[in-house]
Image: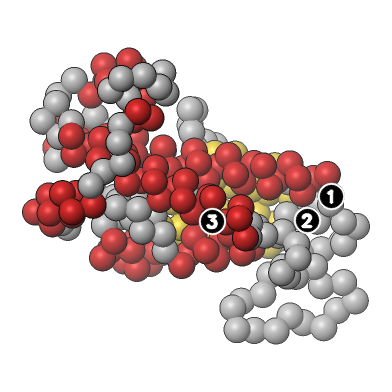
Amino acid sequence: MRIALQQSRYTWRHNKVLRQLAMKLEEVRNESSRTSSSLQSIQFVKEGQKPRSTAVTGTVNSGSSILCRGKWEMRADLDRQLHFPNTICETSLRPDLVLWSEDQKAALIIELTIPWEENVQAAFERKKLKYDDLVQQCKQKGWQTRLYPVEVGVRGFVGTSFMRLCRDFNIRGKAQTQLTRQVSEEAERSSFVLWLRRKDKAWKSFQRSGDSAGSGAGTPASLPHPPQRRLRQNGAKRRGREASN
């Protein structure tokens, strides 16, 4: 485990899943920018509550994305270190994804975790607590802000938080099924790669020769899907000891 942490193996798995999510959200963002309506504001509504009665609410509904109003930008903590937009506020925190609209003065913060399945709820609460101060800071600056802690288990379990994200971004039907399968399989396959190479100390060379290529013998793209039984048996022995990103 110490070697895995030192060599950022868990970060590698986390980023493999994050990339799948970021690619889809970028697709949604681009599509929304082409079909953006003339609504003037976004009203965030908590689950179970009704929106305030206004002339133009801009609430998320079954037929629109949360990005359907205004011009949105997106940054992901991939390839290069993410810097939180200083137009919103100053912070040293680095969420996995941030989307923001200056004309709407709204921000969406997304934080992905790849925990053991039995730790999904704990991971949600931990990330929610971690970013609560940042959310409040953004709101104090006048930005409507929503935090999305999202969990995909190490064996591919996709939590309700992920479905909530899909709903708000209007990723539905076949698109939701496809994205769910992609992140689930990526998490499962990456966990299998980590298990296969658990005693291999040459992780950096594997990343350079394998993962960067994206295909070919011995790379994650060409490995078979992990057998669930074997993964769970070996995972049970190390349960609770693995650090989550």
Mark 1 highlights which residue? Answer: 35
Which SS class for mark 3? helix
Q: Residues within 10 Å of mark 3 (few under 14, many from 20)?
A: few
Would you say the residues marked 1 and 2 are in contact, meaning their CB atoms lie under 8 Å apart?
yes
Labelled disc at residue 177: 3
Compared across the picture, whether 212 is left or right of 135 comes to left
Would you say the residues marked 3 and 1 are in contact, meaning their CB atoms lie under 8 Å apart?
no
Mark 2 highlights which residue? Answer: 68
Between 83 and 111, the one lying in front of the other is 111
Q: CA distance from mark 3 to mark 2?
A: 22 Å
Q: Residues within 10 Å of mark 1 (few under 14, many from 20)?
A: few
Q: Which of the two discs, 3 and 2, labels the residue nearer the N terminus?
A: 2
Which SS class for mark 2? loop
Residue 223 position within the rendered picture, expressed as x and y whole percent measured from the top left: 30, 32
The three-letter amino acid code for the residue at tag 1 is Thr
Q: Is residue 56 above or below residue 186?
A: below
Q: Quadrant of residue 152?
A: bottom left
Which SS class for mark 1? loop
Labelled disc at residue 189: none
Q: CA distance from mark 1 to mark 2?
A: 7 Å
Between 177 and 67, the one lying in front of the other is 177
Between 128 and 49, the one lying in front of the other is 49
Q: Residue at x 50, y 41 (%)?
A: 20
Q: Residues within 10 Å of mark 2 (few under 14, many from 20)?
A: many
Q: Which of the two discs, 1 and 2, labels the residue nearer the N terminus?
A: 1
Residue 215 position within the rendered picture, expressed as x and y whole percent measured from the top left: 40, 22
Residue 165 position within the rendered picture, expressed as x and y whole percent measured from the top left: 56, 60
Compared across the picture, whether 74 is left or right of 230 comes to right
The three-letter amino acid code for the residue at tag 3 is Thr
Q: Quadrant of the N terminus?
A: top left
